[in-house]
Amino acid sequence: MINNPIINNRIVNSKTFAIRFKSFVEEVRVNDPCSEEEKEYLLNIANQLLNYQIQTAVDEEEINYLKRLKLL
């Protein structure tokens, strides 16, 4: 059985996913314009996820995590 990572319209299985995904994509090195376009697309998605997480955080532990990262 696959567990749904989305509960109440939030990615909840890992509060660190969005920032880790963004950090990973930022570090990817590309060698051609098509790959650069893909990297920019993924970085845009990562930023959207992170912004949504920041705007919808209600759990105290998650809020403190975001504050430690200076995102709140």
Image: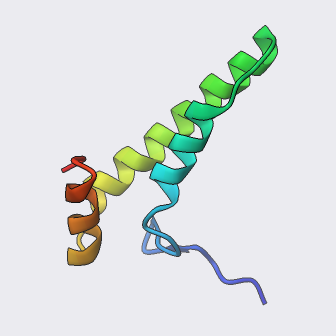
In this view, the residue farthest toward the bottom is: 1
Where residue 26 appears, as percent x and y from the top left, is 56, 32
The colour scheme used to paint the residues is rainbow
Residue drawn 45% across the image and 41% down it: 48
Q: Is residue 54 above or below residue 39?
A: below
Residue drawn 52% across the image and 42% down it: 22
9 or 49: nearer the viewer:
49
Q: Is residue 37 above or below residue 67?
A: above
Q: Is residue 59 above or below residue 33?
A: below
Where residue 61 appears, as percent x and y from the top left, is 26, 76
In this view, the residue farthest toward the top is: 33
Q: Is residue 24 left or right of residue 60?
A: right
Residue drawn 67% across the image and 31% down it: 28
Q: Quadrant of the N terminus?
A: bottom right
Q: Is residue 34 left or right of residue 13?
A: right
Where residue 12 appears, as percent x and y from the top left, is 47, 73
Residue drawn 56% across the image and 48% down it: 21
Q: Is residue 19 left or right of residue 38?
A: left
Image quadrant assignment for residue 30: top right
Q: How many marks?
A: 0
